[in-house]
Image (cartoon, grey):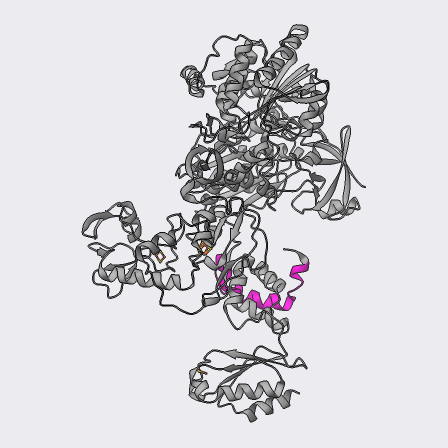
Amino acid sequence: MTDETIEIEIDGKSLSAQPGQMLIEVADANDIRIPRFCYHKKLTVAANCRMCLVEVEKSPKPLPACATPVAPGMVVQTHSAKALDAQKSVMEFLLINHPLDCPICDQGGQCELQDVAMGYGKDVSRYTERKRVVADKDIGPLIATEMTRCIHCTRCVRFGEEVAGLRELGATGRGEFTEIGTYISHSIKSELSGNVIDLCPVGALTAKPSRFTSRPWELEQMPTIAPHDCVGSNMYLHTRRQEVMRAAPRENEALNETWLSDRDRFSYEGIHSKERLLTPRIKRNGKWVDVDWQTALNVAKIGLEKIIASHTAEKVGALISPSATTEEMYLLQKLLRSLDCHNVDHRLRQADFSGQGLAPNFYGTPIRFKELSTLDSILLVGSHLQYEQPIVNLKVRKASLAGGKVMALNPIDYDFNYPLHAKVIAKPFDMLNNLIAIAKVLAQGSSQGLPGTVAAANVEVNDNIRAIAAQLKASNSSALILGAIAFNHPQFNAMYELAELISDMSGSQLVCLPEGANSAGAWLAGAIPHREAVSLDIKKPGLDAKRMMEAKLKAYITFGIEPELDCANPSIVKRALDEADFNVVVTAFSSDSIDAFADVQLPLATFAETSGSYVNAEGGWQTFKGTVKPKGEARPGWKILRVLGNLFDVEGFAYTTSIEVQHELRKQLETLQIKNRQERRFNMDTPHIEGLQRISTWPIYRGDSLVRHAESLQQTTTNDPAAVAMNSKLAAELYLKDGGEAVVKQQYSEVRLPVRIDERVPDGCAYIPGGYSETAALGECFGKIDIERS
Amino acid sequence: MSEVQQALLSDDAKAKIDVWLAKYPADRRQSAIIPALHIAQEEHHGWLPENVIEAVADYVGIPHIAAFEVATFYSMYDLKPVGKHKIGVCTSISCMLRGSDELADHIKQRLDIDWDGTSSDGKFTLQEVECLGACRHAPAVLFDKAYLENVTPEDIDKIIAGEE
Ligand code: SF4
Ligand code: FES
Ligand code: FES
């Protein structure tokens, strides 16, 4: 495309356009409405519905506006007699087979076909034959199908191929017998599948969880921010009478564009979960009793006070969800710090905190997410990006489609929806050596010397390593992406330092994508033991999430988490919580495991029921309001903490809105000292692990308590099951087979798990996911395990 | 792709598919799907079971659904078991005017089958096909890969007898 513009005329208006643009784009940009079904600005042009026919001067026949490129001097009529006649005819054809079941169709009221039929359809059909009927398909728990309604626009097919990168739907058969479906019946697997619900212009594909529950005109559309990943996709919750009925994307070109991941779209179901904690509760003589807020908060306060009085405040520790709002993070740390306690952390799954003092202000990305799609090369380090950050993965896929090379260093050979130019699949405790190897190759022929410990490390260099290094070096623009596996790795700090070194040597950007919706907010608000809000270093830091549990404190506060399902080492966590004298649990969900260790349970509002803000990995603040009233007696976290603060007589807790809390923090942020790069330590010691190594990640829909309670997501096949996965070689060595049962031992505990054969797991390793009660008796994510036949 | 799946295609079939794959650019392997499905159909008794279509898709390197789209679009692919020979009778306009209905009725009676049926001995499947482009010598019949023109019931009898 060139910069020159050309002049065209549509409906008598002179407009300027870019060469190469289609008529419909120019019309859309100028608010001239042309009816369409198959055209979508984010998909390729299929031009198969013919609804967009317009009259173009000098053309004998009407032309499809979606597939007609602009030309200088073009004169177009969208509403001339000829155009209207063509549009009406197309409409008549489309309605030949379309059922008239609008009154029972979920799409009714927001249906593009209905709208266009209102404008262009006839009241009476000349067609008297039977309409065609298409058998429905079961494509999984998220999307309901009513394929008789399909008008074959193929938007859903093109979405799978072009955007999601997983072609599952197709048009089989031909002519009248064309059907959209998967052909072989199976559940759709894409982590972005829900977008076809929005794309489908008719009611053929609708949201299954909200099917038959409401009509679009009854709903209110409330803007909010998605609470699961570090992008913070913009979305709407559609509510009716204080109930969230469904969710939809809110366009933000820089972040989620017009898309939404299934996790963000369907997790609202958790809000209605039967497991919601609806009233404050206290444990009295070993029994749970519902009490009013005042009683519960008093019990919490007195309990904590006692511990502090008899053991000092250092015997109290607090863990907060990395998806809590910035305001909640800020108030929790402020409360604890005012009591002289710095044991507060949000890094629930981190195992290595050795470099925290040298950390940046927060782990995030120096470039915007959208810039990722323009890079020449991207190296994923310890990241199943597609499931960790579905929206970021879309940008990486765009880079790949544009010719960029994506590479990976991972402990599992994940299938990505783009090809990998080079990959190294290494046991967890070999990942560091591979990073060292990349650094060494980069250092060859460069004047820049390697740090002594890196240079001294004796590592193997193979062709894949060379290919990765060469590609990074040869690129004009490149990035390393550190994902959840890297963050939770026992050698995180060394990996981070090396990633930084490799970035420096290859001129790449270092993009960090930690888990949770608000890791950046947590760092800035001080939900870390070694820095107060606005990155102020503390002389004598408190305990990090891991040490807090190892230290067996006397009292714990957990906020927005299910400790055994959310923390790195559930067996240690359980022991610490069981043995503590007093536990205050602020939670949206209750469970047997929480009942067992808690002394007070305070019902917490979910993201939809509170106001607050998230800071995404770009450092962008996104503030949102509550969309519905909290369920039962649940209260927004910031209010709970405010009242606790008041009970403890802490000064400066007289907030009346969450915005006041945010302003207090943001005012301080004006003085934020940027943490410059400091001397790195490059401690390259790798523990020697004999025997089998465990690999653990949190499956896509097990990562936080809200999504774990979203039932439909739990039924998808996208979620890795609670099982032990290994390759067939290891299975044969252990006399195990697919579907059999194994006894898995780690440290002091053992569990029985079904066996799954997965060739993507490297030799000598087994993948056992976290986030399941079935695996919660086990220990740390990465470490030695033993597996036997049961 | 699993080994079991790939065993559904013989080495010979794979070699033949390779010839077609070589005719297209490396990033356009999908282009070879039509001949690839024909090759697979030939070695699977004239029809394409679902798992064979999947094996072809895997071998060519395209999503399964893309192969199903092609296999269900063209009538030349059979998705259900067929007899040893396929008798395709053209019933489009020219052939119809020149007696394809009688011809078809004759075959149906003779073999005691209807359209898409297979004779009890498993030898013949009768199929209705669209214009074969042989209108000049209607009625036309496609017998496996052979074009037969000006076909009479007697011609058909001879063929059937010859194969019996
Ligand atoms: S299901 Fe909907 S989106 Fe897909 S082709 Fe049919 S009408 Fe279009
Ligand atoms: S929108 Fe132009 S042909 Fe469908
Ligand atoms: S109509 Fe039968 S060959 Fe053309």
Percent across and percent down for residue A456 are 63, 27
Q: Residue at x 78, y 45 (%)?
A: A733
Residue A393 forms part of the magenta stretch: no
**Quadrant in which the N terminus of chain B is drawn:** bottom right
Tell me which segment is drawn in magenta. B4-33
Q: Residue at x 49, y 35 (%)?
A: A243
Please tell me which residue lies in front, A504 or A642: A642
Please tell me which residue lies in front, A380 or A45: A45
Percent across and percent down for residue B60 are 56, 60
A33 lies left or right of A639: left
The majority secondary structure of the magenta stretch comes to helix
Residue ranking furthest to the top: A309
Quarter of image, res B36:
bottom right
Percent across and percent down for residue A549 are 67, 20
Q: Would residue A514 be seen by someone viewing this image from the given angle?
A: yes
Percent across and percent down for residue B123 are 65, 81
Residue ranking furthest to the bottom: B154
Ligand 3 - quadrant of the structure image: bottom left
B132 lies left or right of B144: left
The mark tally for this picture is: 0
**Quadrant in which the C terminus of chain B is drawn:** bottom right
Residue ranking furthest to the right: A790
Q: Would residue A361 be seen by someone viewing this image from the given angle?
A: no
A514 lies above or below A51: above
Residue B6 forms part of the magenta stretch: yes
